[in-house]
Amino acid sequence: MPVSRNLLIGLVAVIAIVVIAALLLTMRPIGPAGEETVKIGLIAPLTGSLAEHGLDMKQAAILAVEEINSKGGILGKKIELVIEDTACKADLATAAVQKMITQDNVYAVVGEYCSTVTLAVQPALMESKKLLLVPVSVATKITEQGYKYTARSCANQWMQTTQHADFIAEHLKPRTAAMLGVNDDYGREGLKIWGDRVKEKGVRIVAEEYFDPGTTDFTPQLSKIKAADPDIIFVVANIRDAANILKQAHEIGLYKQFSMLGGVTSEEFLQLAGDDALGLVHVSYFEPTSKRPVAQEFVQKFVQKWNRMPAMYSAGVWDAFMTLKYAVESAGTWDVDKVADAIRKVRFEGAQGTIYYNEKGQAQTKVLLVQVQKVDGKLRRVILYPESDKEGVYIPPERLWGS
């Protein structure tokens, strides 16, 4: 039976509509789960004693997402940021990450500040095949467990602590040292790595003390250290505890060279410690005074957006988001396995310096060693090491104190 002309025209029109719809569908920026945007989670301590650092992380994440989206997104896709507060508590973080996985359907999670929190949420993210981009947590174990979907954009505990110990032993040349650390994964690992390293270089450990999280009176530990009369005192603590330790040490007449890891790298620490911080030598992953062009560009954008200087935690978050951007673009796809492989191959200039990763997903970066000095009457972190970033020379603390 011959097909009528009107029916034929109708069939052609339907076919044309289907073809055009299919073409339009392929042109839409479809995400990993068929969505038009990709959701990226951020977990950080936005409340509690570490809220200052959480703010640094949050502001850097917002800035990075705005920067990426303003340039068309990643492979034509815009990023949607999902932010959750952990208060540095594993149970809160676990619940937040479960929500991100089951309800928000995030592609990746950036975080956390506290290593215990990162270790707590890591297994669930790995089982769900979600990328975990770690910008701050330093526990060496995080990138030593063979997890394909984990990558860390900052130096780990072993990297920062051994570089710190080498600098102290080679430049300050102490004969004896005392150690004081918070009694958790961060503190115990830090003291062990540092102590082992300086002992290899001939430094004798004369005291090793710990304090529990939440401690406010450090006098018992500091009194024992004072009695041991070390040349240098190595401390692993977060900013509030570190500031109190320095103040209470000076209150009991303990004026020695103090040195610390990167947990004190912030303007808030200098405000809390005041002149008691003078002479302190510590690790930093990023300084806003760096003359590297990419670092200065990041600082300019951060200050313009937030009207404050970025801390090193902000730089780590920025580099984590840029890692994701460059890895997805390099892979040419959002396929999580291919992106995880691409992360191990990316190399770019980030806020913290040249960022590239080993096969375990650990960024291979050098840290900075800084000393708190007074410049034009104001407390400032002066870069002592490496030579490429050096801003000044080490000054014995007694000279800075004027006695």
Image (tube, rainbow, N blue to C red):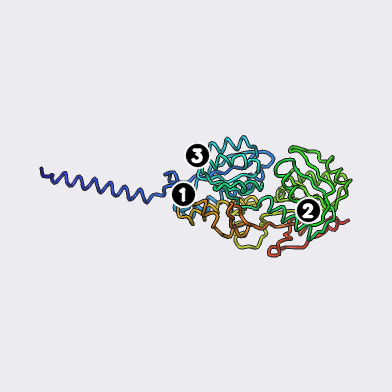
- Neighbours of disc 1 within 10 Å: few (<14), some (14-19), many (20+): few
Residue found 68% across the figure and 50% down from its top: 157
Which three-letter amino acid code belongs to the residue tagged 3? Asp
Report the side of 363 relative to 325 (left or right). Answer: right
Please identify the quadrant where the N terminus is shown. top left
Secondary structure beneath dot 1 equals loop
The reply to whether residue 378 is in sight is no
Residue in front for this viewpoint, 63 or 360? 360
Q: Give the number of the disc on residue 104.
A: 3
Answer yes or no: do the residues labelled 1 and 2 have beta carbons within 8 Å?
Answer: no
Which three-letter amino acid code belongs to the residue tagged 1? Asp
Indicate which label's residue lies in the foreground, 1 or 2: 1
Query: Spatial distance from mark 1 to mark 2, Cα to Cα?
Result: 46 Å
Residue in front for this viewpoint, 109 or 243? 109
Secondary structure beneath dot 3 equals helix
The reply to whether residue 168 is in sight is yes
- Labels 3 and 2: the sequence-earlier one: 3
Q: How far across and how far down the image is residue 291, in percent? A: 65, 63
Query: Spatial distance from mark 1 to mark 3, Cα to Cα?
Result: 18 Å
Residue in front for this viewpoint, 181 or 145? 145
| Residue placed under numbered mark 1 in the picture | 335
- Labels 1 and 3: the sequence-earlier one: 3
Q: How far across and how far down the image is residue 376, in percent? A: 76, 59
Q: How far across and how far down the image is residue 140, in percent? A: 66, 48
Residue found 53% across the figure and 39% down from its top: 100
Q: Give the number of the disc on residue 280.
A: 2
